[in-house]
Image (cartoon, rainbow, N blue to C red):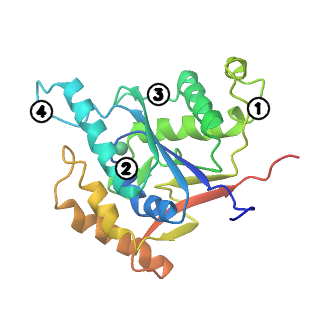
């Protein structure tokens, strides 16, 4: 029997919407899970703005998207998905959201937090970054630092029993300053399968352009398929 086995690495991925992870980093998540990491997802919004049909039942849509996300997470090997239930489309990086994310970080105590890069406003000349992505990313990075590791911030969390926690790594997805490429060639098929679970949002045609994107990212790194991140590492004070 092994006596000095390392505990698995814990990774917490925080994003605005169901499907954000599968588009941007599903291959990396599957790879980390394959390598033995315990991966947790946190969906900040309920995904209820994911339809332009007039008169659509938003509560039913949110429930459908929750089921799609659970199905996708199972394919990627994720341990648990948390849903915070904020309204889709109008997310703000409030102190309330920062407190909730701080509580989650202190509860799960991840080594690595992954979130959306809040500094991205425009992607090249063709896309305005969704404001929910920026809001979720901003709340997440400030939950990582300083809130999660600083006892006097949100003293009510310490009163609830959530002790401070230092996050060692931050991975920012969809970043204009990517400095790290994950080879997802072995998990690309599972990424596509997980993405296509989001049937209320994407059809089979999504496969072609997602493969194209990830092949493009791979070219820069010398892999058949890759996903990119801006990675930051934090040395503890003590
Ligand atoms: Zn999104």
Instruction: Return the residue at label 2.
Output: 73
Q: Name the disc covering residue 150, or none.
A: 1
Identify the residue at image location x=78%, y=23%: 152
Residue 208 position within the rendered picture, expressed as x and y whole percent measured from the top left: 22, 68
Identify the residue at horizontal 53%, vertical 66% (top origin). Answer: 35
- The secondary structure type at the circle numbered 2 is helix
Q: What's the CA distance linking mark 1 and mark 2?
A: 31 Å
Separation of marks 4 and 3 at Cα, in angstroms: 24 Å
In the rendered view, would you say 127 is above or below 166? Answer: below
* Front disc: 2 or 4: 2
Q: CA distance from mark 2 to mark 4?
A: 27 Å
**CA separation in Å, label 3 and label 2:** 25 Å
* Picture quadrant where residue 65 is located: top left
Of the numbered discs 4 and 1, the one sitting upstream in the chain is 4
For the residues labelled 4 and 1, the Cα–Cα distance comes to 45 Å
- Look at the numbered discs 4 and 1 and tell me whether their residues touch, using CB distance below 8 Å: no
């Amino acid at each position: 029997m092994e006596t000095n086995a390392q505990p698995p690495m814990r990774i917490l991925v925080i994003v605005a919407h169901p499907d954000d992870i599968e588009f941007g980093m599903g291959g990396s998540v599957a790879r980390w899970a394959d390598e033995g990491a315990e991966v947790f997802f946190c969906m900040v919004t309920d995904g209820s703005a994911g339809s332009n049909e007039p008169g659509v039942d938003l509560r039913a849509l949110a429930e459908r998207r929750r089921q799609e996300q659970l199905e996708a997470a199972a394919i990627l090997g994720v341990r648990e998905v948390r849903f915070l239930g904020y309204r889709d489309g109008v997310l703000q990086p409030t102190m309330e959201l920062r407190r909730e994310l701080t509580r989650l970080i202190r509860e799960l105590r991840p080594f690595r937090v992954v979130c959306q890069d809040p500094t991205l406003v425009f992607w090249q000349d063709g896309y305005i970054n969704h404001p929910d992505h920026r809001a979720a990313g901003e709340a997440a990075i400030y939950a990582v630092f300083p809130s999660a590791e600083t006892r006097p911030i949100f003293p009510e969390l310490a009163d609830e029993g959530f002790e401070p926690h230092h996050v060692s790594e931050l991975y920012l997805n969809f970043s204009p300053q990517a400095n790290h490429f994950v080879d997802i060639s072995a998990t690309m098929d599972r990424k596509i399968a997980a993405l296509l679970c989001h049937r209320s949002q994407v059809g089979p045609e999504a496969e072609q352009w997602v493969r194209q994107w990830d092949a493009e990212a791979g070219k820069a790194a010398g892999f058949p398929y890759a996903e990119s991140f801006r990675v930051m590492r934090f040395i503890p004070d003590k």
